[in-house]
Image (spheres, rainbow, N blue to C red):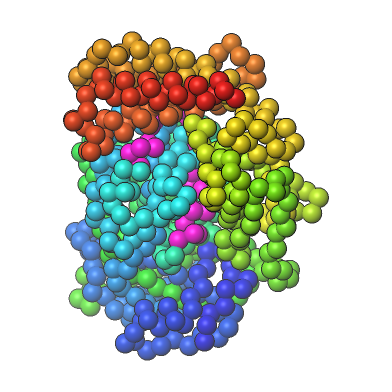
């Protein structure tokens, strides 16, 4: 019978008999009744020499929850594909390790199961996906590496806890039952809105393993390797601190191999209370020859709380300011407050930006704006624009409140026009600074010139004699981020170097940024 997903405690996986029976083909089939909650543990076993032990049978294992023995109902040991995310610290402290991290990420992808679905998030004070919205996951190793290389430009502060929380949310969109994260950071956090205790609670309510890697180098005042160890230990993962840059790749390859050498055990807890309490879990194993074994798995999970009533199916009404748009809202999953917004542009004009807000009843939940960095269309005439939001709680209404068209026209409540004006002030100031810097290098070439340009570009300020300092700063940051990404692509894309000279890149980039400034000024 199918295992019900209704009212499951957080951190407990529901398995349908279709997937479960396929995984345990050839074994005695476990019998499940509806409303059965299966606690799933991922277990690594090594001998006292550190070598993986992969030939154990189910009867070699025993599981205890809060000291009470549990009956193992599901057992598998196979190199099955997983959903795997890299969380990469892109704050300023990571600048010296950038190239080594990209190379290590590429080696990690190559060592993983070819069917793994991969994604990456980079974070400083903001968390950003490396892959485009249309390709949230990939099994293409080169696409994964190039996407990460393009967006990974270290600068700013560190929102590590926000990144872990975002990574756990992203994992839920994956199609595989096993979902893991690899966090590359020194453990410092100086910009998160999420607290460490909130992150620990979320990991305890998830079945994801988290591996942490602290890159070599001096640990700043915000660095916290102990925090990384605690985060990894709470999930059954491991914490690593490679001694030099060359070992970052070795570490990630080791993690990829570790993921592929895992037993999966499932049991139905004898504790049926849905009280939100943390339950301690211990796994023991005995080898046929009684040799010592080292077991690693999560140290427990947090039980869920039974809902007061079965939630009603999600329905979201839509209003929008323009007849030129068709807007539809699709829930990503029945039990997750995440939504996919599909905007179809029926106009003959290009859609540059839109502003939206969501609400439940009379309460506004969240609002935002969607656009590209360089005022390029998000939806050309006759095309669609698709994006996802995770408002944190269920919504019943989405409103598109303002639009910016390619000819500069604004439809809606005017807030978008005001916001865009302030952002454009900051962009215009920074674009003029960038163009001045580009002109200083228009007759230089060679590696010394590239390094000198990067050093000067890194020092571009984020302040100016303009009103609305915060929004103007955001516009300046967008231009600076775009410049560093363009420089990164020139330096590291195999199809570009060394066939294109730096002077040629300077000329092409100057033309592109002059065109960008003209578009901003036209608004």
Residue 95 versus residue 378 in the image, above or below: above
Q: Residue at x 51, y 48 (%)?
A: 166
Residue 167 in the magenta stretch? The answer is yes
Task: State the image coordinates of residue 89 (x, y, percent, origin top left).
Answer: 40, 37
Give the residue at x 49% y 43%: 163
Front-lying residue, 188 or 120: 120
Q: Is 62 within the magenta?
A: no
Who's the residue at 52% across and 16% down the image? 429
Magenta region: 148-174
Q: Where does the image place residue 296, in percent across and percent down from the top left? A: 35, 61
Give the number of marks.
0
Q: Is residue 358 visible?
A: no
Residue 132 horizontal side relative to residue 198, left or right: left
**Does 102 sit left or right of 271 as displayed?**
left
Residue 331 in the image: x percent, y percent? 61, 61
Give coordinates of residue 395: x percent, y percent. 70, 55
Identity of the residue drawn at 63% across and 57% down: 329
Whether residue 26 appears in this view of the structure is yes
């Amino acid at each position: 019978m199918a295992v019900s997903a209704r009212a499951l405690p957080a951190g407990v996986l529901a398995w349908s008999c279709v997937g479960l029976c396929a995984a345990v083909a050839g074994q005695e089939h476990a019998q499940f009744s509806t409303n059965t909650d299966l606690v799933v543990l991922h277990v690594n076993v090594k001998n006292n020499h550190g070598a993986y032990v992969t030939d154990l049978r189910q009867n070699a294992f025993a599981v205890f929850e809060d000291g009470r023995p549990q009956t193992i109902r599901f057992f598998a040991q196979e190199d099955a594909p997983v959903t795997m995310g890299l969380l990469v610290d892109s704050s300023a402290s990571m600048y010296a390790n950038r190239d080594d991290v990209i190379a290590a990420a590429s080696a990690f992808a190559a060592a993983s199961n070819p069917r793994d679905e991969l994604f990456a998030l980079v974070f400083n004070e903001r968390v950003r996906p490396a892959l485009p919205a249309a390709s949230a996951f990939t099994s293409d190793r080169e696409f994964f590496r190039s996407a990460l290389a393009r967006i990974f430009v270290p600068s700013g502060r560190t929102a590590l806890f926000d990144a872990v929380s975002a990574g756990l949310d992203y994992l839920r969109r994956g199609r595989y039952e096993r979902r893991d994260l690899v966090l590359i950071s020194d453990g410092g956090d100086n910009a998160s809105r999420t607290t460490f205790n909130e992150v620990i609670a979320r990991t305890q309510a998830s079945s994801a393993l988290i591996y942490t890697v602290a890159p070599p180098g001096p640990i700043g005042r915000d660095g916290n390797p102990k925090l990384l160890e605690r985060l990894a230990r709470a999930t059954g993962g491991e914490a690593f601190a490679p001694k030099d840059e060359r070992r970052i790749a070795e570490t990630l390859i080791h993690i990829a191999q570790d993921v592929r050498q895992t037993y999966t055990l499932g049991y139905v807890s004898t504790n049926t209370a849905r009280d939100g309490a943390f339950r301690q879990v211990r796994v023991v194993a005995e080898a046929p020859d009684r040799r010592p074994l080292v077991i690693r798995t999560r140290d427990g999970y947090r039980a869920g709380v039974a809902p007061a009533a079965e939630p009603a199916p999600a329905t979201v009404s839509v209003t929008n300011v323009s007849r030129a748009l068709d807007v539809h809202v699709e829930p990503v999953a029945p039990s997750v407050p995440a939504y996919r917004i599909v905007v179809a542009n029926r106009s003959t004009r290009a859609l540059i930006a839109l502003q939206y807000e969501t609400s439940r009843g009379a309460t506004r939940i969240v609002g935002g704006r969607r656009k590209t960095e360089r005022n390029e269309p998000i939806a050309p005439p006759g095309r669609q624009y698709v994006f996802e939001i995770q408002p944190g709680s269920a919504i019943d209404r989405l409103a598109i409140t303002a639009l910016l068209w390619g000819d500069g026209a604004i439809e809606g409540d005017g807030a978008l026009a005001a916001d865009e004006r302030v952002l454009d002030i900051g962009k215009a100031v920074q674009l003029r600074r960038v163009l001045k810097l580009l002109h200083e290098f228009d007759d230089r070439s060679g590696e010394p010139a590239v390094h000198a340009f990067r050093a000067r570009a890194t020092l571009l300020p984020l302040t100016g004699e303009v009103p609305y300092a915060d929004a103007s700063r955001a516009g300046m940051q967008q231009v600076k981020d775009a410049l560093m990404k363009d420089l990164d692509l020139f330096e590291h894309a195999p199809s570009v170097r060394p066939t294109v000279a730096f002077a040629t890149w300077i000329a092409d980039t100057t033309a592109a940024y002059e065109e960008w400034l003209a578009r901003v000024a036209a608004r």
